[in-house]
Amino acid sequence: MHPTYIPALHTYFESVGIPAPPNWTPRLKRWARIQLPNKQIVCTAWKEKAHSGSVRTSRNIMVCIKQSFNVLSLTSLKWFENINGARTANFGEVQFFFQANTGNNQMKGLALVSVYGQPDPDLLRDSSQALWVSRYHGDEALKVIDIKSISTCVAMIPFTKPPDGRFFVCEKMGLEVAYLADTQEDPEDPGNPDDIYV
């Protein structure tokens, strides 16, 4: 377990009423990817960064605390949500998925996510709320979230060339139509034991 992950895990477990000693180091079985109700496959930085060569990035997510099985567009969502009590942007990069007992012998699917920063207010205003540009903070902005709060998989594309740490959000085109038609993404290995479904 990487030391930078431990504070986020401590914070989450304390928020659900499970205090942990200061020197506690969790042991977790990590999951590589999940399939969302909209049929998208969400992967993780843990596995994607381990691959050599070109990899299709699908580890960035939109978080919607009020879960809905409908596909929502960016313009119909509130721009900010409460994640673990902190007012933060609702986009993040999934580090890995895992399951944990959150009390009363209740197993819950969770994700360790690096949350992107707040959007540039000037660009957001000048684009009529269409262009969300925010900074990636890596291990400095780790949060644990319920996987059922993941709404969709999105692309986070470098805003400048060369990259300056800012990214803009791009949704998958036609996702609403694909959801209505019950179209499913075809994972490279459908029998992969690292998959779980929500």
Image (spheres, rainbow, N blue to C red):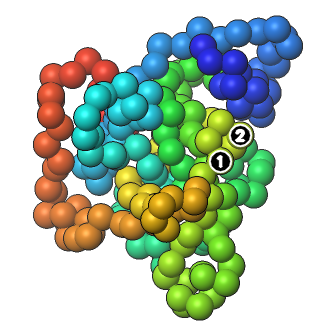
Q: Is residue 165 above or below residue 48?
A: below
Badge 1 density bin: few <14, some 14–19, many ≥20, Cα 10 Å = some
Q: Which quadrant of the view contains residue 183?
A: bottom left
Residue lying at 51% horizontally and 45% vertically, measured from the top left = 93
Quadrant of image for the N terminus = top right
Residue 98 as seen in the image, left or right of residue 72: right
Name the foreground residue: 84 vs 131: 131
Q: Quadrant of residue 65?
A: bottom right
Most extreme residue toward the front is: 162
SS of the residue under disc 2: helix
Residue at left offset 69%, top offset 43%: 141
CA distance for labels 1 and 2: 6 Å
Look at mark 2 in the image and give the residue it sits on.
Answer: 140
Residue type (three-letter) at the residue carrying disc 2: Glu
Q: How busy is the neighbourhood of tag 2: few (under 14 within 10 Å), some, or many (20 plus)?
A: few
Q: Are marks 1 and 2 in contact (CB under 8 Å)?
A: yes
Query: Where residue 50 appears, x then y in whole percent?
Result: 37, 25
- Residue at image location 68% in from the left, 79% down from the top: 121
Q: Position of residue 42 (x, y in %)?
A: 35, 42
* The C terminus lies in quadrant: top left
User: Exactly how many numbered labels are in the figure?
Assistant: 2
Residue 154, horizontal then vertical, whole percent: 39, 57
Residue 46 placement: quadrant: top left
Residue depicted at 38% across the width and 58% down the height: 155
- Can residue 20 be seen by looking at this rendering? yes
Which residue matches tag 1? 137
Q: Label 1 amino acid? A: His
Establish if 25 lies above or below 122.
Answer: above
| Depth check, front residue: 9 or 48 | 48
